[in-house]
Amino acid sequence: MMPDFRLYAITGENFHPGRSLLEVMEEAIQGGADIIQLRDKTSHKDELLQKAKALRALTRKYGIPFIVNDHVELALETDADGIHLGQGDMPILQARQRVGNKIIGISTHAVEEALLAGQQGADYIGAGPVYATQTKADVVAPVGLSYIREVAEKSRVPFVAIGGIKLSNVDEVIRAGATRICAVSEIVGSENVAGTCRAFLAKLDQGGQGV
Ligand code: 3NM
């Protein structure tokens, strides 16, 4: 069983100048991020392993789940709590055979994908990109708030809204039905990572009705 979560922080490479991966992710956790994903499309194998081990240790210290993007074997090797798949990655059923009862998440961009992910045993789905994003190179066109409304109504597994989500637009995402938020650049690029996380959580607490 996966623990529920509200604020999903994913590693990115565009940190505020002078900040390191571990510093940024620890601040995110201290600000209330309650699940962390290593998503790294550029590091070599050894570097990726070092990062995964460091994030595993960090998330263990705080008792929150650690998810590895794409790399099923790396997730197994570092005893991550789960993996996150893209639509073009290993199919869920195959991944389930490899990872047993670890958490499996998958990115979805259309309701058919969301429903299929639920049927195939995904533990959670990403729903996005809500808005345009610079962070994911090959992502589909923004799906907008209508997808969030649809997934909120129809998905049988928990969903997390993602893609271009900022403090300035998250209220309408929450009002569309999102109770879990993921942001990359708004969190890791912030000068005040913990404060940004706390502000996202406050907006979730207010149900998107805050000022
Ligand atoms: N997945 P930012 S959008 C990693 O829609 C990722 O599946 C997406 O980064 C999806 O918060 C995205 O900086 C990037 O826009 C999100």
Image (tube, rainbow, N blue to C red):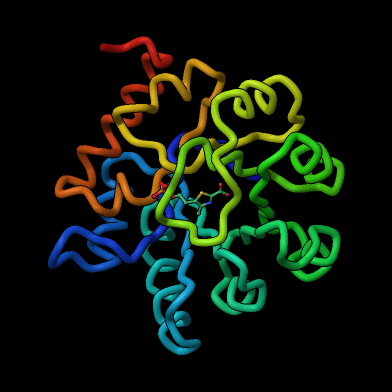
Which residue corresponds to the image point at 55% horizontal and 30% vertical from the top-left?
Answer: 144
Which residue corresponds to the image point at 57% horizontal and 40% vertical from the top-left?
Answer: 128
The front one of 119 and 135 is: 135
Q: How many marks?
A: 0
Which residue corresponds to the image point at 56% horizontal and 64% vertical from the top-left?
Answer: 69
Q: Can you tell which quarter of the image residue 2 is in?
A: top right
Image location of residue 157, percent across then percent down: 72, 35
Q: Is residue 192 left or right of residue 210?
A: left
Q: Can you tell which quarter of the image residue 170 is in?
A: top left
The front one of 134 and 172 is: 134
Q: Quadrant of the C terminus?
A: top left
Image location of residue 36, percent across then percent down: 45, 54
Image location of residue 9, percent across then percent down: 41, 49
Image location of residue 191, percent across then percent down: 15, 49
Most extreme residue toward the front is 141
Q: Quadrant of the N terminus?
A: top right
Which residue corresponds to the image point at 61% horizontal and 23% vertical from the top-left?
Answer: 146
